[in-house]
Amino acid sequence: MKIARARPERFGGIVEVESPRALLHVDRQMMRELGYPDSPLWQLPPEGPLSAPREVHVVLSRRCAAGCRGCYVDATPGGAALPFEDACRILDELAAMGVFHVALGGGEAIELDYLFAVASHARRVGITPNLTTSGLGLDAKAAEKCRVFGQINVSVDGVGAAYAAARGFDGFRHAERALRLLRAVKREVGVNCVVSRSSFPHVPEVARLVRKLRLNELELLRFKPVGRGARLDEELTPAQCRELWPMARRLVWRERIRVKLDCSFAPMVFWHRPSAKAAAFFGVQGCVGGDVLAAVQPEGAFTGCSFTARPAADARIPGAMAEAWRSGFSEFRDYAAHAPEPCASCEYLRLCNGGCRAVGTPDPGCPRVQEHRSRLPLPVVAG
Amino acid sequence: MKLFRRGRVLQATFGCNPNSSSLGVDVTFLLFGAAFASALAVVLGALLRREPR
């Protein structure tokens, strides 16, 4: 277990290890045992926001030729892009803040001729770059260059006709080819699958594809009414919200694959009352915007997550991100302290943090919220 | 007499996240429950201490 680097935090520190690739939160005593000096942060109460995000989603562009009908960033073939120089300078600043990982995406990041140069720069400054791609246009030469990334996931929202139904064009063959090309050069290749009302029944087919191609993970991402997705009526039904966690467990057992759910699914998991201790240990959290996660938009906005439009700073201004991190993001960080019912009495509040801000607060997809609202008296309408 | 308390691993997340929002739930690990988490914390702590920085 080789330690790549570490940074102090109020509670102790975060240690990045290379094999197995992991981020470990350790207490102050463990930091001392590992040879790190006492930090001024250890004079503060252990509870509180991290000194910097652990990872940042860098939306390199809103540029993509695919035109998916539910695109979160409203990408078009001529959409805005973060220039190479700005991307590198932002990475320098994130490295200085102590960020461990960046998730590069778009739009379709592979359409940018400087994508691999940005990823190489991230490596040079000590940040692990990761990538999400549709796989469209990825050839063997580009796949070889993808060794620079940590994890690469290809978006596959269905197999065969289900792909076309979900995304609005028939790109499954291209996505599958990209997965095979990438898997031939590296092990850390997985699938992203957006789970919507229509695609929900087809998720097991995607899980079988992950097993067949020997990929290392299936990430299920909740459909969010953001970007072009706001025009679709594809949010999960209450029954699907309740069924999500049992389905994910079945996929793990049946297909013997690693399944991950995005943070917006956390309320639907907590409703099934998993072990809170295990959830805390494995970093199972709801909204992590402005805490573990931040985002940089192609226009330079520094936001709590890529699904929120409210900027805390302009990332292109030197020092602005670090300053905003110290004082901003109260809409994410203060929720638990002032949470309304039914969140206030929920035992998972500190982990869940009210669910996904992109869909509403408190999260309307949370079964507990749905039950609470069904018990409220109907409004009196004046006759 | 003051007892020496060894350092602890408080949280472990494995792999890298390539997405804007996939920090949520690692189903595979969560299925194993609290006892597994406690045991893993001890093992990871021991492995960390063995490794020179």
Image (tube, coloured by chain):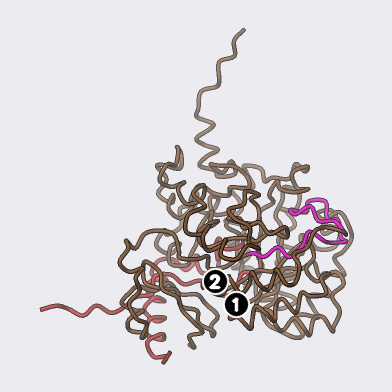
Chain colours: A brown, B red
Location of the C terminus of chain A by quadrant is top right
Q: Dot 1 lies on which element?
A: loop
The span from disc 1 to disc 2 (Cα, nearest Å) is: 7 Å
Between A292 and A326, the one lying in front of the other is: A326
Pointer 1 or 2: first along the chain: 2
In which quadrant of the rendered view does residue A172 lie? Answer: bottom right
Q: Looking at the image, do the residues carrying marks 1 and 2 touch, with CB atoms under 8 Å apart? A: yes
Between A191 and A16, the one lying in front of the other is: A16
The percent position of residue A171, horizontal first and vertical second, equals 87, 64
The percent position of residue A302, horizontal first and vertical second, equals 62, 58
Residue range corresponding to the magenta coloring: A57-77
Q: Is residue A124 above or below residue A264?
A: below
Our reading of the magenta stretch's main secondary structure is loop
Between A101 and A250, the one lying in front of the other is: A101
* Residue tagged 1: A127
Between A270 and A189, the one lying in front of the other is: A189
Numbered disc total = 2
Q: Which chain does the residue under circle 2 lie in?
A: A
* Residue tagged 2: A99
The percent position of residue A363, horizontal first and vertical second, equals 56, 44
